[in-house]
Image (cartoon, rainbow, N blue to C red):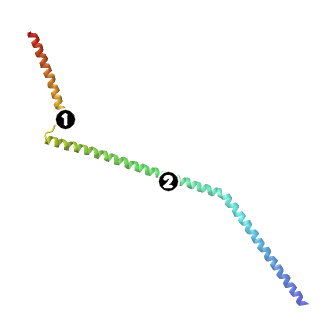
Amino acid sequence: MAEEVEVVENGSNAFTRVGDLVHKTFMVGLGTVGLVQDELVKIWDDSGAFIEKLEERGEAMSKDGREKLDAQREKLNSQIETRQDQVKDLGSKANETIEKASGTVLTTVNVPTSDDIQDLSKQISALNRKVDKVRKEQQELAAAQA
């Protein structure tokens, strides 16, 4: 009979161990659910702050990008203005060189320049006034003698 008591105690002890193991397993699962729930609530609560941080960072990057773009635009505009001034200067120098060269060529082949023609026109006008004055004087003389 002593053997029977020992077997029953061993069986009862094994049954208790299995029950304890099942209970511990259940508690681990329940604890896991609780921790996951707590972490999800924490993430959900912190998501507003996280989203705000993302938004602030995006705005900062946008502002920084805009400032860099504006600086680059100003730099390019300055370079364009400098190049335009250089082109104007070169254009003026080219015109002066062409005028001098064409004047030299026209003088060499005895073709009058526009300045020469204006001078001649002024001289002709002056001569026409003198001729008109002389004609008027002759007409007055002729009228006085008649």
- The percent coordinates of residue 39 (x first, y second) are 69, 63
Residue wearing tag 2: 65
Vertical relation: 45 (above or below) 11: above
Q: The N terminus is located in which quarter?
A: bottom right
Q: On the rendered structure, is 83 left or right of 93?
A: right
Question: Percent position (x, y) of residue 96?
Answer: 23, 43
Residue visible at 64% across and 56% down in the picture: 49
Q: Secondary structure at mark 1?
A: helix
How far apart marks 2 and 1 lie (CA) works out to: 59 Å
- Which amino acid, by three-letter code, is at mark 1? Asp
Quadrant of res 27: bottom right
Which residue is depicted at the point 87% across and 85% down?
A: 8
Q: Taking 41 as reference, is 106 left or right?
A: left
Mark 2 and mark 1 lie on one chain; the one further toward the N terminus is 2
Task: Please say if the residues under marks 2 and 1 sit with CB atoms less than 8 Å apart.
Answer: no
Position of residue 95 relative to residue 117, above or below, is below
Q: Nearer the viewer, residue 127 or 60?
A: 127
Checking the image for residue 115, the label placed there is: 1
Residue 88 lies left or right of residue 32; in this view the side is left
